[in-house]
Amino acid sequence: QVQLVESGGGLVQPGGSLSLSCVASGSIFGIGAMAWYRQAPGKEREFIADSTSGGSTHYADSVKGRFCISRDNVKNTVYLQMNSLSPEDTAVYYCKMTILTLGRWHEYWGQGTQVTVSS
């Protein structure tokens, strides 16, 4: 069984920064893409950023230049550094990983961590 656990969410003032982490554990034989998504109240879940196993990164236009995704393949961890936060960034943030387990690749999601940007 594979589990993803996020941490680092919380309350931050506009213009502030926050760093999220997501650690995968369990029967892991390889990890492909790692990604972050978010879902604001009343809205659909949206893509934020991803990091491929080949080292490429991609960002949604809404966060480009403000957010930075990184990964530690040894620790099975993906990070999201968020800067210049605004109230529009308020959402539940989810990580997703494509993981090789039991001989097959599967997608796994974390449980989500709340990020609230407010003064």
Image (cartoon, rainbow, N blue to C red):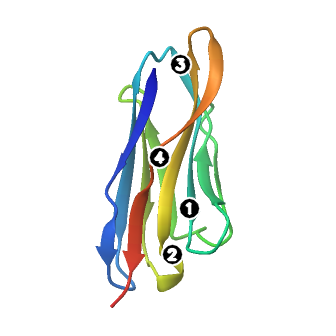
| Residue that label 1 marks | 38
Q: Earlier in the sequence, mark 3 or mark 2?
A: 3
Callout 3, which amino acid?
A: Gly
Q: Earlier in the sequence, mark 3 or mark 1?
A: 3
Callout 4, which amino acid?
A: Ser
Q: With respect to residue 104, does 78 lie above or below? A: below
Judge by depth and name the residue closer to the eye, 57 or 79: 79
Q: CA distance from mark 3 to mark 2?
A: 31 Å
Mark 1 vs 2: CB contact within 8 A: yes
| Residue that label 3 marks | 30
| Residue that label 2 marks | 89
Q: CA distance from mark 3 to mark 1?
A: 24 Å
Farthest top residue?
103
Q: Nearer the viewer, mark 3 or mark 4?
A: 3
Mark 1, secondary structure of its residue = strand
Q: Which mark is residue 70?
A: 4
Mark 2 vs 4: CB contact within 8 A: no
Callout 1, which amino acid?
A: Arg
